[in-house]
Image (tube, rainbow, N blue to C red):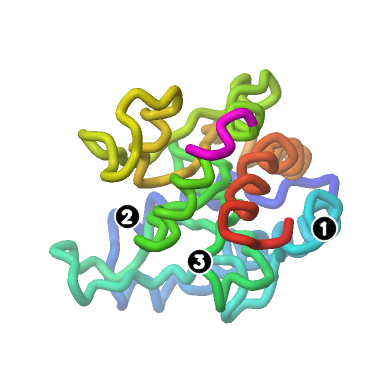
Amino acid sequence: MTTPYFTPATFRFLRDLKANNNRPWFNEHKPRYEEVLRQPFLQLIADLQAPLAKISPHFVADPRGQGGSMFRIYRDTRYANDKTPYKTWSGARLFHERARQVDAPSFYLHFEQGDCFVGGGKWHPEPESIKRIRAFIANNPAAWKKATRSKSFTSHFTLGGASLVRPPRGFDPEHELIEDLKRKDFVAVERFADSIALSAELKPLLVDRFKRVAPLVDYLCASLDLEF
């Protein structure tokens, strides 16, 4: 696809949704959502299938409208103070083929006016997964540094998420990677301009960034006994 997936109308819809985050407005404007956001995003996901398979045959870009890679626009408000029903951003998770059975890392893309980003890793791992990842980092420091300290990685990505204040129990506080062992999330993110999101450069950029973050995803897969 040489023409852009998204247009200024995409962000205009999200702005309007933010100002009118209620069911009557959304139902009236649902055709806009389908035309300028949902269908183009599903096409982008479909077009990412082949390049993703070259990076790893075990990860899936699933363009199905229900149960696929793209997150639903409907918010889960059951336990939230904010009861607005719709997300004012759109994202997709390109997931491991065993993600429904195992707490696995993923590749991720996010579109929101003023906050578009691409990344990969494991966000909010389950307690057992955190233990396994930390143990793997402690026992395989050289491979972790190779995955997260290379110029290819650091020229675009930064590691993010939450961390513990103190070293986790059972780990040497003097370990050379103690700051990484304190992490509660193992994710890397790069933000990009809205203008990129609305251009034909979007897909090539995403594919390039998936390649760059792949060593981190590969490392996390190894820590969890998953194929990459």
Verify CB contact (< 8 Å) between mark 2 and mark 1.
no
Residue 62 sits in which quadrant? Answer: bottom right
Category of crowding for the residue at label 1, using alpha-carbon neighbours closer than 10 angstroms: few (below 14), some (14–19), many (at least 20): few
Camera-side residue of 118 and 128 = 128
Identified by mark 1, the residue type is Ala
Front label number (2 vs 3): 3
Q: Quick one: SS at disc 3?
A: loop
Which residue is labeled 3 in the image? 103
- Up/down of 68 relative to 44, above or below: below
Which residue is labeled 2 in the image? 18
Verify CB contact (< 8 Å) between mark 2 and mark 3.
no
Can see residue 32?
A: no
**Alpha carbons under labels 2 and 3: distance apart:** 32 Å
Front label number (2 vs 1): 1
Can see residue 43?
A: yes
Q: Residue at x 30, y 38 (%)?
A: 163
| Mark carried by residue 53 | 1
Category of crowding for the residue at label 2, using alpha-carbon neighbours closer than 10 angstroms: few (below 14), some (14–19), many (at least 20): some
Q: Residue at x 81, y 61 (%)?
A: 57
Q: Quick one: SS at disc 2?
A: helix
**Magenta part of the chain:** 138-142
Camera-side residue of 187 and 103 = 103
- Place of residue 183 in the rendered image (x, y in percent of width and height, measured from the top left): 37, 40
